[in-house]
């Protein structure tokens, strides 16, 4: 019997108080995610239960019980407090998927500071933009990533501490750098956890939009209420499960479901810190007898591409429930996984701003391959007319996904950007920025983004950010960036570029520009294809008409070209 | 062949390694997290430019790019 049981019954009888009661939380009380993810689990008698089983790319394995997680997060909190860090200070986690990231996250929350996880592959410019916006006080990182921080340090007088978790004794510690070794630091039994309340800020995740710089999405400790319950009802996490969430905590899935949802439910979770390899992934599942696997369409399509022969080499019979998030899971992937694993991946839909799963498939509910399912109990979601912002009465019409505000994990604002935050709400609805339709059984069918943001490998990339980076290359005069279809990643970045006088297109220049953007922003933002053109399509007022380039890439109708300058 | 190994190793270190992580001819590059799947595209482009070859996309898998030695073997398949 699944945790959710009957979806329809849950919808009829739902109240977020169900989650509050399970967590023994009463409105108005102290609520601290760090405590709920460690101390509370120990108090429930699971102190010796493995909470985190970590494996690195070299095969090194470390196991942390919930008591270890409790003690070490206390130690980290104490260390941060000793540096002078205070409640609501932003502390960035800029690490690979190592234990220090998972447990450090909890330590930051325990002192009431705001955890700001950032994807460790970000280049120095991407890093700077996000740290500068948040006025981050401290960054916890590894020695391999320190050079990126040092490169931009001169521009960041607000950054007081660079905490290196794998510092090599004998090597010099430079300006503002300090070493901290999580495994050798004295474990602290007693620690005064800061009494955060429901609306105390907890996590700051950055997300990209079409225009402007990335936005800091502010979450609060009350988000636990929906992250806990969606983990239990959508991912079906139970006492004896061994859970693997493949997402990096630099992204919201990796924190909401790779840390908070997992630990607050007291399950054993396994983390593999290694690059993708189908063999290695299946080996990992077999070795740790993974039962619940939460992954992403890009990874699933990569597994499809690797073929079915590899699967036969491994015993994956431990798997009992599979879920996917990041971008719509195409029906072929659902059907493939059902055939190959005997279990279909269940798609679900949410975003950084929503903090927890909004629309989903559920254990026991009929899956329609290609559909993202139905709203989570307690979530009112519909499709609205993009001009009138009124819900459609008929099914089957494509419009904007709209969600009634007020669920626990809903973002509270964009950091220092309240005006942009307010624009996310129209006529009493929160608009995620995606288009969909609903069929006559209430299933949602994703159509596409309502803007130019590129979704590559499940991560949003801003064309504006990439274009801005391209313009910094000495050879580039103008650029336009669009999404290009890709089997594995759904979309990849493609750049159209005009060159300055004195530069000519060449394969070497193509590669140079790719690497330039990759190092400045991130591998995700790197154009996977660059097309040198003599001119970009523009309106008479000089605005680049990206939609024409997009339509050509996708084989779509170009549409109205009456405003095109050079038509 | 020695020269190709060193050319590729030096390029990987220059483009993808930010600290003093040791990279040998057999260091796992993709599964070891040194080169991620998105960056693999730029590495493929480098090899194609350098050795005047064209590697079909469906042959450019994480497995064949996972070490300098494996990359050398891949390049040799396509050199005329």
Image (tube, coloured by chain):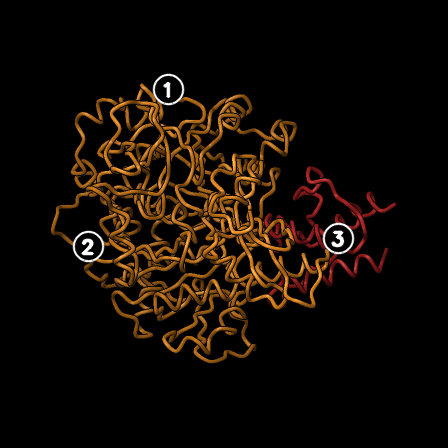
Res. A555 image quadrant: top right
Height in image: A158 above or below A351?
below
Among the 4 quarters of the image, the one containing residue A168: bottom right
Q: Disc 3 designates what residue?
A: B47
Kindly identify which residue carries mark 2. A199
**Marks 3/1: CA–CA distance:** 47 Å
Rounded to the nearest angstrom, the CA distance separating label 2 from label 3 is 53 Å
Q: Upstream in the sequence, badge 2 or badge 1?
A: 2
x and y, in percent, of residue A567 in the image: 55, 46
Task: Say above or below: A29 vs B59.
Answer: below
Q: Is residue A97 visible?
A: no
Q: Could you say where residue A385 lies in the image, as x and y percent from the top left?
A: 29, 34
**Residue appearing at x 18%, y 35% in the figure:** A18
Pick whichever, A273 or A74, lies toward us: A273
> Which quarter of the figure is the N terminus of chain A placed in?
top left
Pointer 1 chain: A
Q: Of helix, strand and loop, which one carries label 1? A: loop
> Mark 3 touching mark 1, by CB under 8 A?
no
Q: Position of residue A57 (x, y in %)?
A: 58, 51
Which label sits in the foreground, 3 or 1?
3
Image colour assigned to chain B: red
The answer to whether A331 appears left or right of A34 in the picture is: right
The colour of chain A is: orange
Q: CA distance from mark 2 to mark 1?
A: 37 Å
Q: Which residue is mark 1?
A: A366
Secondary structure category for the residue under label 3: helix
Identify the residue at image location x=43%, y=70%. A163
- Provide residue A125's location: percent of width, then percent of height: 49, 66
Chain ID, mark 3: B
Q: Is residue A111 left or right of residue A504?
A: left
């Amino acid at each position: 019997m699944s945790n959710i049981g009957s979806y329809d019954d849950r919808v009829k009888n739902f109240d977020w108080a169900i989650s509050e009661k399970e967590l023994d939380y009463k409105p108005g009380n102290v609520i601290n995610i760090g405590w709920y993810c460690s101390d509370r689990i120990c108090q429930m008698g699971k102190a010796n239960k493995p909470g985190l089983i970590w494996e690195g790319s070299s095969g090194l394995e470390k196991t942390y019980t919930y008591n270890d997680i409790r003690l070490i997060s206390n130690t980290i909190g104490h260390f941060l407090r000793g540096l002078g860090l205070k409640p609501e200070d932003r502390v960035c986690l800029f690490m690979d998927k190592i234990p220090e990231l998972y447990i450090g996250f909890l330590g930051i929350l325990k002192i009431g500071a705001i955890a700001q996880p950032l994807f460790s592959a970000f280049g120095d410019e991407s890093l700077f933009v996000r740290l500068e916006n948040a006025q981050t006080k401290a960054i916890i990182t590894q020695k391999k990533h320190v050079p990126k921080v040092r490169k931009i340090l001169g521009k960041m007088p607000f950054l007081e501490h660079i905490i290196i978790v794998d510092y090599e004794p004998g090597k010099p510690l430079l300006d503002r750098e300090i070493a901290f070794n999580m495994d050798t630091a004295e474990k602290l039994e007693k620690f005064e956890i800061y009494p955060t309340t429901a609306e105390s800020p907890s996590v700051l995740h950055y997300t990209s939009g079409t225009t402007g710089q990335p936005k800091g999405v502010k979450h609060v400790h009350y988000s636990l209420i929906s992250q806990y319950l969606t983990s239990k009802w959508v991912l079906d996490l139970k006492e004896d499960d061994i859970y693997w969430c493949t997402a990096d905590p630099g992204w919201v899935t990796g924190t909401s479901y790779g840390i908070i949802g997992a630990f607050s439910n007291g399950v054993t979770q396994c983390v593999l810190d290694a690059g993708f390899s189908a063999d290695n992934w299946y080996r990992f599942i077999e070795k740790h007898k993974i039962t619940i696997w939460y992954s992403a369409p890009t990874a699933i399509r990569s597994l499809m591409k690797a073929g079915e022969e590899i699967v036969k080499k491994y015993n994956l019979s431990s798997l009992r429930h599979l879920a996917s998030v990041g971008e719509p899971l195409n029906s072929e992937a659902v059907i493939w996984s059902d055939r190959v694993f005997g279990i279909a991946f269940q798609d679900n839909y949410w975003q950084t701003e929503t903090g927890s799963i909004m629309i989903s498939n559920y254990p026991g509910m009929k899956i329609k391959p290609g559909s993202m399912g139905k709203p989570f109990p307690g979530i009112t979601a519909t499709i609205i007319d993009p001009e009138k912002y009124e819900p459609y009465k008929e099914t089957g019409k494509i419009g904007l996904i709209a969600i009634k505000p007020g669920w626990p994990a809903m973002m509270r604002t964009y950091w220092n950007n309240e005006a942009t935050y307010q624009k996310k709400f129209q006529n009493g609805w929160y608009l995620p920025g995606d288009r969909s339709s609903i069929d006559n059984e209430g299933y949602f069918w994703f159509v596409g983004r309502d803007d130019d943001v590129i979704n590559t490998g499940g991560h949003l990339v801003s064309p504006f950010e990439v274009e801005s980076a391209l313009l910094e290359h000495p050879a580039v005069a103008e650029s336009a960036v669009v999404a290009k279809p890709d089997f594995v990643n759904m979309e990849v970045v493609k750049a159209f570029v005009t060159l300055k006088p004195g530069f000519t297109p060449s394969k070497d220049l193509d590669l140079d520009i790719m690497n330039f953007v990759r190092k400045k922003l991130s591998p995700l933002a790197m154009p996977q294809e660059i097309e040198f053109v003599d001119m970009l399509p523009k309106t008479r007022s000089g605005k680049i008409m990206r939609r024409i380039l997009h339509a050509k890439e996708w084989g779509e109708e170009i549409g109205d070209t009456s405003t095109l300058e050079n038509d | 062949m020695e020269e190709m190994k060193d050319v590729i190793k030096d390029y990987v270190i220059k483009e993808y390694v930010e600290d003093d992580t040791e990279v040998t001819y057999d260091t796992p590059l993709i599964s070891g997290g040194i080169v991620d799947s998105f960056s693999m595209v730029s590495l493929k482009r480098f090899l194609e430019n350098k050795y005047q070859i064209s590697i079909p996309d469906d042959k450019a898998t994480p497995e064949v790019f996972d070490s300098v030695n494996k990359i050398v073997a891949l390049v040799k398949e396509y050199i005329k």
